Amino acid sequence: MTFENEVARELPFLRRYARMLTGSQAAGDAAVRETLQAMIAAPDEFRTEFPVRNELYRVFHKLWTDASLRSIDLSSAVIGALPHKARKALLLTTIEGFEADDAAFILAIEESEVRALTAEAREAISAMLSSRVLVIEDEALIALHLKQLLVDMGNDVAAVARTASEAVEAADQVQPELILADINLADGSSGIDAVDEILQKIDVPVIFITAFPEKLLTGERPEPAYVIAKPFNPDHVAATVMQALLVSREASMDAEHA
């Protein structure tokens, strides 16, 4: 596989990561584009003796750390800067599947610090966050598993919907603070359509769970900031829920202080 093909293969996952960090498709995708432009302008920055995936994420973080992405319009992002190191460490080692030593390489810190930061972030999940959640999922066993995970994290699963119409009705009734949604639902309806209708009435973070995440990470159209692949890892769910709620609550606090 050529170098260009290896980079292209990893881009959907870097987009996922960047969107989670910023809480915005527009800002996350812009950050990835800026990273690619910097690599083209300064190819010597990319060290070919290391795995392409590790180097891609390292260069991404170096650019953000160096504040080289100030040209990006962050007006559509809910936060204007990257989250704390603890969140980066948790997302890299859970959602992106890096080992602690690889995450340390990417963040330019010691492996022991990565482990400490990850533990810190996990504690924040239970200590800081709880919310009223709507689950949109037509497969009973998956819905039950998600409900148990969310409850164990301290959340209240206020409703579980199997179809788009049920989801819209449930959202009106329970006013969720977070939504977890499948895409293909029981009656052939769409979780995306349900969420679009719900978001016309309330502003709430949404996490999509799908067997084909790459279809929502193309960067070619409006796409969600939070995407989890099926079959899902419980740690992926926990980390993504944490990040979605933190970003949402920071945005609310910023709005109150504006």
Image (cartoon, rainbow, N blue to C red):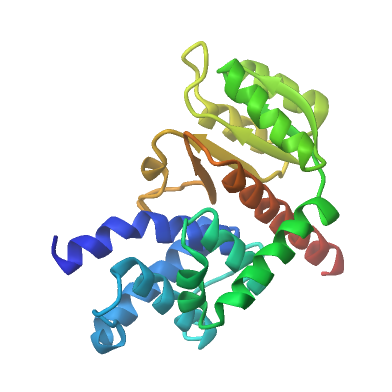
Quarter assignment of residue 56: bottom left
Q: Quadrant of the N terminus?
A: bottom left
> Residue 229 versus residue 250: which sits nearer the camera?
229
> Residue 238 versus residue 203: which sits nearer the camera?
238
User: In the shown orientation, is residue 179 left or right of residue 208?
Assistant: right
List x then y, in percent, for residue 142: 58, 24
List x then y, in percent, for residue 121: 71, 62
Q: Quadrant of the C terminus?
A: bottom right
Quarter assignment of residue 174: top right
User: In the shown orientation, is residue 35 left or right of residue 170?
Assistant: left
Question: Outermost residue, left direction?
Answer: 2
Question: Outermost residue, front direction?
Answer: 112
Residue located at (37% from left, 70% from top): 54
List x then y, in percent, for residue 202: 73, 39
User: In the shown orientation, is residue 101 left or right of residue 9?
Assistant: right
Instruction: Note whether 123 is above or below 134 in the view shown.
Output: below
Q: Examine the rendering and report whether any part of residue 26 can be seen.
A: no
Q: How many marks?
A: 0
Instruction: Note whether 46 is above or below 218 in the view shown.
Output: below
User: In the shown orientation, is residue 93 left or right of residue 175?
Assistant: left
Instruction: Note whether 258 is above or below 197 in the view shown.
Output: below
Residue located at (42% from left, 43% from top): 216
Residue located at (52% from left, 13% from top): 186
Residue located at (63% from left, 52% from top): 239
> Residue 19 versus residue 99: which sits nearer the camera?
99
List x then y, in percent, for residue 163: 59, 16
